[in-house]
Amino acid sequence: MGSIATRWDLVVVGAGIVGCSAAYYAARAGLRVLLVERDAPGSAQSGRNLGFVRQQARDFAELDLMIGAMRLWEGLEAELGRPVGWRQGGNVALLLTEADLVSRRDWHQRGREEFGLDTRMLSADETFDLLPHLARDRGVLGAMYTPSDGRAEPARATRAFFEAALEHGASVSLGQPVSRIDVSAGHVSGVWAGDRFHRADVVLCAAGAGSAQLLRGAGLDLPQERIRATVVRTAPRPGLRLDPCVSGPQTGIRQDVNGAFVVSVAGGEYDVRPDSWRHMRWYAPTRKANPDAARINYLAPLQHLLPRGGEAPLTDIPPTRDAVRPEERRARQALAEFGQLFPALADLPAETCWAGIIDTLPDLVPVLGPVDDVGGLLVATGFSGHGFGPGPMAGKAMAALAAGQPSPADLTRLSPMRFHGPRPVKAAHRT
């Protein structure tokens, strides 16, 4: 028989940047908060991503959330009293085809007119002025540039929220996964972690790629899938400074606080699992619209049986029990495009490589908000590889809802209930 702990106003499942920021804002508002994490804060995708903090090129359904997050990022180090590696150097998306120019112009116009963004379209000459080390023989026609975008260090930022939440009175349970969200008479009653039951008035499921399984047990069948993404980091080149984050044809590039370059190819590997059939109908339109977004790895069930050797990455990322395997082919592809775009940096050796699991949804935007049929159950998951930037505002919005207050960001089109229906949602293109 499990023991019963204190009754909490809010139990947060998952100590990624969304869960940690939700715990921080809820504790600061006076709620009794318990944060439950099976490994360590930031050990999953919140500590393993590229570190882009961008408004640019987002789906308009999540843009209000991201604009609110940007206001938080701008004062985050002062608010939390901790460095997070924040730098507001902008974001540049390189344009190499006429189709790129057309699609980005359309986004630029709507972003400026409806949302008031400072996004600009740059000519080729203006792009080279902004990025003087960019190769001039790669067919760059111009760029889309948002000066107010920025970057931060993922693991540092997640830990900063975690530590600030503890300082404001949040409690924490590490090392024991949540096995079940309990529902009684149409309302959450708490969560099980090991043999311990934590009673709660509100439960926030922010468990990343583990969310779908927990939510199914609570009555919400969310068509969430998992993509394994690879990131590589070069040796530092502190004498050469790249202020903006750069999105190339296939590769995202960021210089970190130590002068190294963090590089990743968009997309990743879809490792086939025994229950891969479960959400096939939801993803058919998305696969058709984004044929190169994920390579299907049919050998995954066999690979799970093999020893997982190799050196641990040289990073400050906390380890995860999943021991996610980076894909060497993706790392080589990322470094190749990086060297082609910035020849002055092509000689930088790869210092380390790691991988993480992206929790994705068919329309490539997250679910944020309450579950209609289960009182007290909030969901914040499915960020589809671009949740680090909006993470602080997503957490703040969930904390507000947990306290019975309105969300500070518009979540109308991000409801978890949008997947309840007979037909798949409209396919989305990855940006």
Image: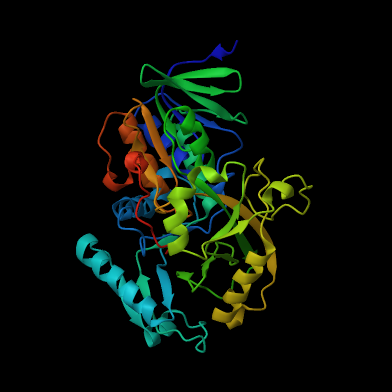
Q: In the figure, is residue 286 to the left or right of 352?
A: left
Residue 52, above or below 305: below
**Residue 258 image point, x, y percent:** 59, 63
425 is higher (above) or lower (below) than 97:
above
Residue 234 visible from this viewpoint = no
Model colouring: rainbow
Q: Position of residue 388 (x, y in %)?
A: 46, 51
Q: Quadrant of the C terminus?
A: bottom left
Q: Residue at x 31, y 31 (%)?
A: 372
| Quadrant showing the N terminus | top right
Location of residue 38 by image quarter: top right
Q: Quadrant of residue 364?
A: bottom left
Q: Residue at x 51, y 42 (%)?
A: 278
Nearest the eye: 227 or 35 = 227
Query: x, y percentage for residue 319?
Result: 66, 44
**In this picture, is 92 found above or below 410?**
below
The quadrant holding residue 40 is top right
Q: How many marks?
A: 0
Which percent across, then down, holds residue 214?
Answer: 50, 32
Q: Residue furthest left?
A: 113
Foreground residue among 389 and 383 = 383
Q: Would residue 100 be visible to someone looking at this image? A: yes
Left or right: residue 57 versus residue 259 is: left
Residue drawn at x 63%, y 45% as measured from the top left: 318
